[in-house]
Image: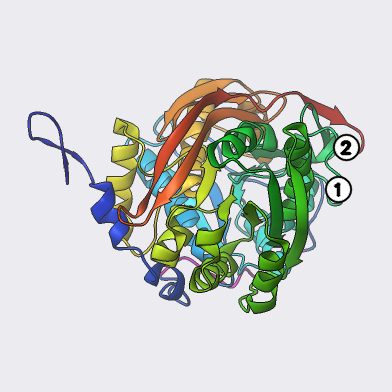
Amino acid sequence: MKQSSDGTHIGVNRRSFLKGTGAAGIVGLAGCLGDGDGGDGGDGGDGGSGSSGGSTGGGTGNPLTVGALYALSGSIEVIGRPMMNSTELAVNKINENGGIDGRQIELVKRDNASDPATGVEESRSLVNDEGCSIVFSAYTSAMRNAITPTYVQNEVPLWYPTLYEGGVCTNIEGGEGFSGDINVSKEKLEWVWFNNAVPKQQIQPYIPWLMDQEDIESFYLIGSDYVWPQTTNAVLKNFVDENDGTIVGEDYVPLGFTDWGSKLTDIEDADPDAVYFTVVGSSMVAMIEQAAELGLTDQHTWAGNIMTEQEANSAGSAADGIYTSAPYFTSIESEENDNYLSSYEESYGTDTTPNFVAEASYWAPLMMRQLLEENNPDVSSGPEMKTALENETEITAPQGPVSMQPGSHHCTIQSRAGQYNADASEFDVLQEFGQISPGGITVDGECLL
């Protein structure tokens, strides 16, 4: 355990915590939902419309029903489980400390199985059967795009704690506009809240720093085949071009892809200075392990903005030296982070690792609590929840100070660059970019980028 200068205990030792997470973080999670994680979800209803969604009883004597819908099985489980754990940890902390102005939270947990169709079914059940007034959910943009209409139709806020491409459109072509304003569908913006990074916050400061750090002139882009990697790479091309770099190759693979032989040969033939990856979940771990076996992680700089401690620890020494950008790393020194890590380990052990999407999943309910206490602790429906959330507030998260911008539904957050240190089983923070606002959020009748 970490010790303060006078020898008293102040939190978990990050290295001993993270050392326990290796391959078991990927392989050992499947099928271990535990009590209350799943549920059959009922028939899910038809999505409904109007303001029928949300809890039906207000007042401090009635619990506030909150939903959590993450991947507890399938290819995204490796990330979904620490997200679920962190949301549950925050709700437990709120309840143990008096709830929301004396009102307890009832958390309903569901598994989206890494499958958008399942996510839609479970969303309908959380809203129509369970009466949730808000739901915290989703890792991939594909999942978010699939489930958002259910929350729009039922007028229930959806809180999305994951980095994303900067718009909430179903189909996005090109990266124009991402360096500045973000156009967001008014309908979708009205019911979705975001508390993780958009490109301006995560990769705009990171790319020129990375290019200078490693003297990079050329990139090969490799990603999973869905909207976030494709759109992130469209944005990335703009930033690379702005800094006089070139793209020498680009390719995408299906979710769950693990046979990297021919793809790695293509990368080797292109001979880039850097391989920039937006591959997610178990596919990322397989890619890094196989690239290391071929010596490619030594021949080229490997970097991305999606790798977390969970995947890096699962890849082990193969991930040593890989760069990433994130608002949060477990190695951050702060009282809030010490408390988060120690309470996470106490509750969930070391089979899973907190990371920057798990951390956002943790402080999202804490920010919700503060917004409700400041504006309306007795909310009893989705529309009442929305009204309470439409206010500015700031809290100190494990990553540092963060604030919600009313109207835009996006947060000002921290931005950092790190490099994985396999010996320490954590990312060394190499650059602090500080707090960055999400920039201009342009609300439009259509998604126009």
Residue at figure coordinates x 61%, y 39% from the top left: 211
Give the residue drawn at x 32%, y 34%. Answer: 333
Residue 103 location (% of width, % of height): 43, 37
Q: Indicate the position of residue 374 as horizontal and vertical percent values.
A: 51, 21
Residue 449: mark:
2
Q: Is residue 143 rendered to the left or right of residue 395?
A: right
Q: Residues within 10 Å of mark 1 (few under 14, many from 20)?
A: some
Give amino acid for label 1: Ile
**Which residue occupies the foreground of this view, 124 or 270?**
270
Question: Are circles 2 and 1 on residues that touch, CB within 8 Å?
Answer: yes
Residue 172, disc: 1
Can see residue 246? yes
Mark 1 residue element: loop
In the foreground, 138 or 133: 138
Type of residue at label 2?
A: Leu
Q: Main secondary structure of the magenta part?
A: loop
> What range is drawn magenta here?
35-45
Horizontal side of 288 relative to 233 (left or right) equals left
Residue 308 is a magenta residue: no
- The quarter of the rendered structure image containing the C terminus is top right
Q: Secondary structure at mark 2?
A: loop
Query: Which of these two is toward me, 173 or 276?
Result: 276
